[in-house]
Image (spheres, rainbow, N blue to C red):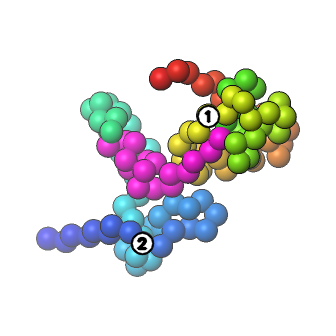
Amino acid sequence: MRLFSETEGPRATLTRQPTEGRSREGGLRLGEMERDCLIGYGATQLLLERLMISSDKFEVNACEECGLMGYNGWCTYCKSSKKMAQLTIPYAAKLLFQELMAMNVVPRLVLDDA
């Protein structure tokens, strides 16, 4: 019987996600098929914990007016700090938004009162 367990370990510099594999002292990676099974079982809190909280949780500011990510509570598009909301998203999602904006594709976040 083999067991492998890691509470914290090294992370990839670019994505801030745990490295893969026991040889690299990495964490347990959750693939698409495992994610789909957890969705099928309705295990939303486990998905949140595995895919964001213990992986690459990141705090961002988003403008409620235009839906763009801000910087230090300031929206550079609206030139205002009035309607800024703090969100927790995976760091990989922030990287995706930045890459899209570098290609002149502007993703906008639609914020709800939840």
Which amino acid is tagged 1? Answer: Ala
Residue to which mark 2 is pinned: 9
> At x 19% / y 71%, what residue is drawn?
2
Q: Is 56 contained in the magenta span?
A: yes
Choose the circle earlier in sequence order: 1 or 2: 2
> At x 38% / y 69%, what residue is drawn?
8
Picture layout, residue 87 above or below residue 42: below
> Callout 1: helix, strand or loop?
strand
Residue to which mark 1 is pinned: 85
* Nearer mark to the viewer, of 1 and 2: 1
The residue nearer to you, when weighing 10 against 2, is 10
One can see residue 99 in this view: yes
Picture layout, residue 28 above or below residue 99: below
Which residue is farthest bottom? 23
> Callout 2: helix, strand or loop?
loop
Marks 1 & 2, CB-CB < 8 Å contact = no
The residue nearer to you, when weighing 24 against 109, is 109
Which residue is farthest left? 1
Q: Is residue 90 left or right of residue 21?
A: right
Q: Quadrant of the N terminus?
A: bottom left
Residue 108: percent from the left, percent from the top?
Answer: 71, 29
Residue 70: percent from the left, percent from the top?
Answer: 73, 41
Which residue is farthest top? 113
Highlighted magenta segment, given as a residue range: 46-61
Cα separation between marks 1 and 2: 31 Å
Residue 110: percent from the left, percent from the top?
Answer: 63, 24
